[in-house]
């Protein structure tokens, strides 16, 4: 878990540097090697690491618009993920998806920029495992801002009524962009939503990796044993704004300070020292993470950008009639006008 967490943290620190290149002084979101939005999860690593430690390669994890910590914990190829974020040809989706649309079938990972949209595919993966008589498990990660979404609630219902091997993991950072949780729901503890579907709901009040690990062991174990889904909510303390460049003018200073005060990575390091690891052991893990991340970023930046013509490829699996991958002619059908 420590390895996954420090890899994710360092990865995002490096992405942040690359992302800001060319975007200053006036924040120009379209400039630089990573154009567009970038949502970082620094501070939330414990949720991903604690859950994904229980998953196998053939299990599935889906994530929302803030996917890197989950992708790393699920074992997504770091180089191809980075190339995707940089929009390069050898990226996971040939550079056309970007950081919110990472898809790695080898690692059983997908994410979506549409919030709660990872839930139905996770239910689908759970249903597939059940139909095939396999013991695979699917986990859907989502933010607390998505817990009133139809896609989430319908997914809970289907997973419960069909006893599917799915775990829903809500990362609760108390904010959905600038909207505090208390203004959109009266349910302070999102895991209580589970009661309406007669499934177990568990909340981990602090993003302590070992506490998440313990809660997830039970939830994943229940799913794998064929005993149905669980809803798990983890309180997280995100150290960043909603997206890179967010001035966070909506967020009270005390809230920011509270999030910075206690870091789940440092907390796990304390536990590991208590269990007998030396500082040198931890530094070796961090050094290895830095090497792998730096290598992935260097590799990604060396990859070619896709040819403009490739924009038409991979859009449809079976193009409906009338859809062509040929250049449009711009002629109006049926006449001169
Ligand atoms: C269905 C849908 N509605 C609105 C948006 C715009 N949007 C992007 S992120 C976000 C807030 C998400 O908050 P939360 O789920 O708590 O995740 P967090 O950003 O805090 O990690 C919204 C409303 C979206 N992507 N999808
Ligand atoms: Mg949130």
Image: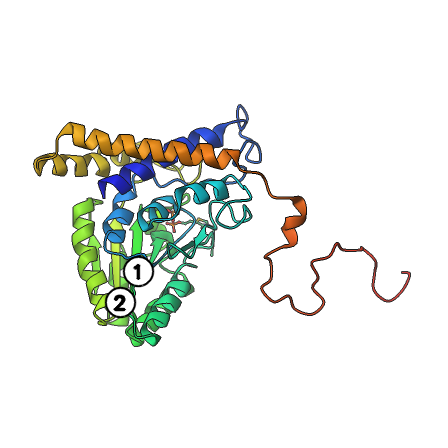
Write the residue at 24% across / 69% down. 199
Image coordinates of residue 138 in percent, x first then y, are 32, 62
State the quadrant of the C terminus.
bottom right
Colouring style: rainbow
Nearest to the observer: residue 287 or residue 61: 287
Drawn side of residue 93 relative to residue 133, left or right: right
Drawn side of residue 87 relative to residue 186, left or right: right
Residue 18, compared with residue 65, is above or below; it is: above
Q: Residues within 10 Å of mark 2 (few under 14, many from 20)?
A: many
Residue 328, compared with residue 273, is above or below; it is: below
- Name the residue furthest right: 336
Image coordinates of residue 57 in percent, x first then y, are 32, 56
The answer to whether residue 20 is visible is yes
Q: Residues within 10 Å of mark 1 (few under 14, many from 20)?
A: many
Write the residue at 71% across / 61% down. 324
Q: Are marks 1 and 2 in contact (CB under 8 Å)?
A: yes
> How many marks overall?
2
- Name the residue furthest top: 25
Q: Which residue is mark 1?
A: 168
Nearest to the observer: residue 185 or residue 144: 144
User: The residue tagged with tag 1: helix, strand or loop?
Assistant: strand
State the quadrant of the N terminus.
top left
User: The residue tagged with tag 2: helix, strand or loop?
Assistant: loop
Res 13 → quadrant: top left
Image coordinates of residue 253 in percent, x first then y, are 32, 32
Drawn side of residue 249 relative to residue 260, left or right: right
Image coordinates of residue 213 in percent, x first then y, are 19, 51
Nearest to the observer: residue 282 or residue 241: 282
Write the residue at 86% across / 67% down. 334
Q: CA distance from mark 1 to mark 2?
A: 8 Å
Q: Which residue is mark 2?
A: 229
Residue 229, compared with residue 65, is above or below; it is: below
């Amino acid at each position: 878990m420590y390895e996954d967490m420090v890899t994710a943290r360092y990865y995002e620190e490096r992405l942040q540097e690359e992302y800001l290149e060319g975007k200053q002084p006036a924040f120009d979101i379209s400039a630089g090697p990573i154009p567009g939005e970038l949502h970082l999860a620094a501070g939330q690593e414990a949720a991903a690491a604690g859950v994904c430690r229980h998953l196998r390669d053939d299990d599935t994890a889906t994530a929302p618009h803030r996917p890197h910590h989950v992708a790393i914990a699920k074992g997504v190829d770091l180089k191809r993920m980075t190339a995707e974020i940089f929009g390069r040809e050898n990226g996971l989706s040939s550079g056309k998806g970007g950081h919110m649309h990472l898809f790695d079938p080898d690692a059983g990972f997908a994410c979506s920029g549409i919030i709660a949209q990872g839930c139905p595919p996770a239910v689908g993966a759970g249903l597939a495992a059940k139909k095939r008589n396999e013991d695979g498990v699917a986990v859907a990660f989502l933010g607390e801002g998505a817990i009133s979404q139809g896609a989430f609630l319908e997914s809970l219902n289907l997973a419960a009524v069909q006893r599917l091997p799915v775990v829903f993991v809500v990362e609760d950072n108390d904010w959905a962009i600038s909207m505090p949780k208390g203004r959109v729901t009266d349910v302070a503890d999102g895991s209580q939503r589970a009661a309406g579907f007669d499934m177990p709901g568990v909340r981990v009040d602090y993003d302590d990796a070992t506490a998440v690990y313990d809660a997830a062991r039970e939830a994943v174990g229940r799913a794998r044993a064929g005993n149905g889904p669980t809803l798990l909510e983890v309180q997280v303390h995100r150290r960043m704004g909603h997206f890179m460049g967010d001035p966070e003018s909506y967020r009270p200073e005390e809230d920011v300070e509270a999030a910075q005060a206690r870091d789940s990575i440092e907390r796990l390091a304390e536990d590991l020292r208590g269990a007998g690891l030396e500082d040198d052991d931890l530094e070796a893990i961090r050094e290895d993470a830095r090497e792998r991340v730096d290598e992935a970023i260097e590799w990604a930046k060396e990859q070619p950008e896709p040819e403009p013509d490739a924009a038409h490829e991979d859009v449809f699996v079976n193009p409906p009639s009338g859809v062509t991958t040929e250049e449009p002619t711009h002629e109006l059908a049926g006449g001169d006008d």
